[in-house]
Amino acid sequence: MTDNVMIQMKSIQSIYDEKTETELITQGKFSKKNNSYHISYEDSEATGFKGSVTEILVTENKFASIIRTGSTSSDLIIEPGKKHHCHYETPYGSMDIGIYTHSIKNNLMDDGGDLYLKYTIDINASYMSDNEIIMNIKKA
């Protein structure tokens, strides 16, 4: 069953000593299928991806993917202790990026909860940024 939820999300991007924080509160959808949690929401100007939809799939603390479709598209694979090469499209062009995941903390339950993702992005093996996503999901 898919529930309407309120999603509170904080994104922290660190490039060396410089941090940028973005906070978003939006409505979305939340469900559990086959031991995976599915979170989806429409992006807005606040996320920088207006016209896109983001879906996050989470399986325990072992795996997550962030799939964005619409005006921009990407499919990021988040798996602790591993590096994945992912395709990322923006209005300015597409690129292949590396995602090295430090940790996933999944405290989601059938009625919502918290999710924490921490990963590093590189482009052509050159460091780009450290990233954290902190989400809280509550039934609307």
Image (spheres, rainbow, N blue to C red):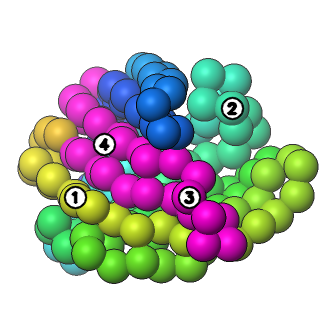
- Residue bearing the label numbered 4: 3
Q: Residues within 10 Å of mark 4 (few under 14, many from 20)?
A: some
Sequence-wise first label, 2 or 1: 2
Q: Which mark is residue 104?
A: 1
Asked whether residue 97 is in view, the answer is: no
- Residue bearing the label numbered 2: 48
Sequence-wise first label, 4 or 2: 4
Is the Cβ of the residue at disc 3 closer than 8 Å to that at disc 2?
no
Q: Residue at x 60, y 72 (%)?
A: 125
Q: Residues within 10 Å of mark 1 (few under 14, many from 20)?
A: many
Residue 77: % across, % down: 45, 71
- In the rendered structure, which amino acid carries the disc numbered 1? Ile
The stretch of residues the image draws in magenta is 115-140
Residue 126: % across, % down: 62, 64
Q: Quadrant of residue 83?
A: bottom left
**Cα distance between the residues tagged 1 and 4:** 23 Å
Q: Classify mark 1: helix, strand or loop.
A: strand
Is the Cβ of the residue at disc 4 closer than 8 Å to that at disc 2?
no
- Residue bearing the label numbered 3: 127
**Cα distance between the residues tagged 4 and 2:** 25 Å
Q: Classify mark 4: helix, strand or loop.
A: strand
